[in-house]
Amino acid sequence: MIPGEVEQAMTTLYDTLGVQTDATEEEIKRAYRKAAMKWHPDRNHGAQEEVARATFQEIKDAYAILSDPAQRKVYDAVYAEQMRGWEAQRTRQQQAQAKREAAARAADEAAYAEMVSVAIRFADEGHNRDVLFGVLLGRQCEAKRAAQIADSVAALQASRREAAKAADAATPADDVAEPTVSDQAQTQARPMNEDGPNHHTRGKQASQSSRDESAAAAHPAGALSGLWFQFLNGLRF
């Protein structure tokens, strides 16, 4: 029995008369008179006559039971038992529906994850957004979802490429080689001549002197500064 049939089966005699389950005898009587006048066959002719006749009979049957205290007591007991059965049935239906919905969601999430994985794989191979979209369509992916996945994956790959370029640009080029420990040790191990510094030292000094002269030449007092640096270098020897 589907949920709609359960709700239809739960229509009670109280519902037929339009009163609450705790209605008094007077309330039941007034409700019966009002409903009987509305649905009496003499007041409903033509296409509505058959419907009115059947409804009027239901109203009479409901009033016959609910207006009798003994019959109403029995009906209430049976109704309560039926209500428990209907509630249990409805609970089972709701649980079954919840399981079906959970299974459907799990399947949908798995399919979505698979499509994303496919798109990322093709993007890693260098394909653009349009190719990703076409591949997803070819795998029976819904067009709107395929477009969403293709856009997202393409944007992600573009962001990664830009980040990689920025990282490469930020890495300084190692143009000048630092002296190694071996080079330093060899320099220190070279013997000094008795008369003065060794050839390596003189070469460094000559290079330093050349750089000093160049710096001096660039200064506003270039000529005098150059002679001054030469004089000081001469005193060292």
Image (tube, rainbow, N blue to C red):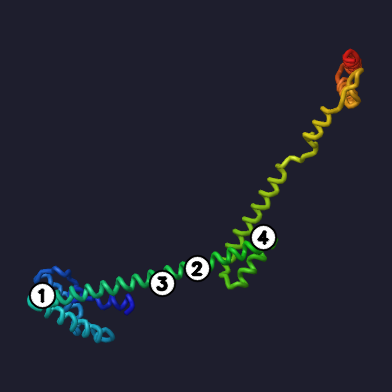
Q: Which label sits in the foreground, 2 or 4?
A: 4
Q: Do the residues labelled 3 and 2 touch (CB within 8 Å)?
A: no
**Image point (29%, 72%), residue name:** 90
Tag 1 or tag 3, which sits nearer the N-term? 1
Asked if the residue under mark 1 is in contact with the one under mark 2, i.e. CB atoms within 8 Å, the reply is no
Could you give the CA–CA distance between mark 4 and mark 1, rounded to whole angstroms? Answer: 76 Å
Q: Quadrant of residue 191?
A: top right
Q: Position of residue 85 (x, y in %)?
A: 24, 75
Nearer-N-terminus badge (2/1): 1
Residue 115, image x and y in percent? 58, 66
Tag 2 residue: 108
Query: In the image, is residue 225 above or below residue 56?
Result: above
Type of amino acid at the residue the image marks with label 1: Lys
What residue is shown with label 3? Answer: 100
SS of the residue at dot 2?
helix
Residue wearing tag 4: 124
Residue on which the image places disc 1: 73
Q: How far apart are marks 2 and 1 (CA)?
A: 52 Å
